[in-house]
Image (tube, rainbow, N blue to C red):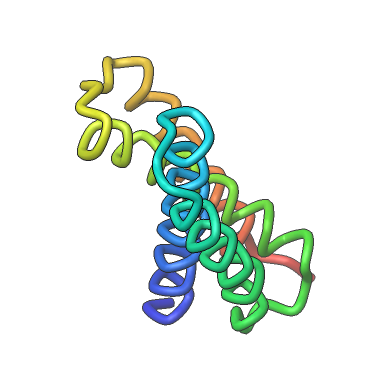
């Protein structure tokens, strides 16, 4: 479970960080190299989830989606300095509950 959580965290940081670098390049007029580095990081994001031990692609990505939402709220708070409100936290918590259901529900 620790490995799965670490890979989800790493994938989330790669996706959000890579997207943020491209945002800075295009929207904030940062150097072209921000876009290049962002693209490389996004390619790494595409590779990281394949390292999960769960056998079903769709299930891994569905669960990752919930983790991504939670990390995006944290990113917005820490990097963009936009304090999440009650509904941001509630929505992120609901998503994390969904992650637990997707990954650890008993199946036959």
Could you tell me which residue is drawn at 48 percent across and 63 percent down? 37
Q: Does residue 79 appear left or right of residue 6 in this picture?
A: left
Q: Residue 33 or 87: which is nearer the viewer? A: 33
Report whether 45 appears left or right of 92.
Answer: right
Image location of residue 70, percent across then percent down: 40, 41
Question: Quadrant where the C terminus lies?
Answer: bottom right
Q: Residue at x 43, y 81 (%)?
A: 3
**Rendered position, 87 above or below 48:** above
Let me know if residue 52 appears in the view.
yes
Going 27% across and 16% down the picture, which residue do you hit?
Answer: 85
* Residue positioned 24% across, 32% down in the render: 77
Number of numbered discs present?
A: 0
Q: From the viewer's perspective, is 93 left or right of 95?
A: left
Position in image of residue 34 (x %, y %): 44, 53
Which one is nearer the viewer's eye here, 91 or 108? Answer: 91
Quarter the N terminus occupies: bottom left
Asked if residue 97 can be seen in this view, the reply is no
Up/down of 75 relative to 4, above or below: above
| Image coords of residue 69 (percent x, y) | 48, 39
33 or 92: nearer the viewer:
33
């Amino acid at each position: 479970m620790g490995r799965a959580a670490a890979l989800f965290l790493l994938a989330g940081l790669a996706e959000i960080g890579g997207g943020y670098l491209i945002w800075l390049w295009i929207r904030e007029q940062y150097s072209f190299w921000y876009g290049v580095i962002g693209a490389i990081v996004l390619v790494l994001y595409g590779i990281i989830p394949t390292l999960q031990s769960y056998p079903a692609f769709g299930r891994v990505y569905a669960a990752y989606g919930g983790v991504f939402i939670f990390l995006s709220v944290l990113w917005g708070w820490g990097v963009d300095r936009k304090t999440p409100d009650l509904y941001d936290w509630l929505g992120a918590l609901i998503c994390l509950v969904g992650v637990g259901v997707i990954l650890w529900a008993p199946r036959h």
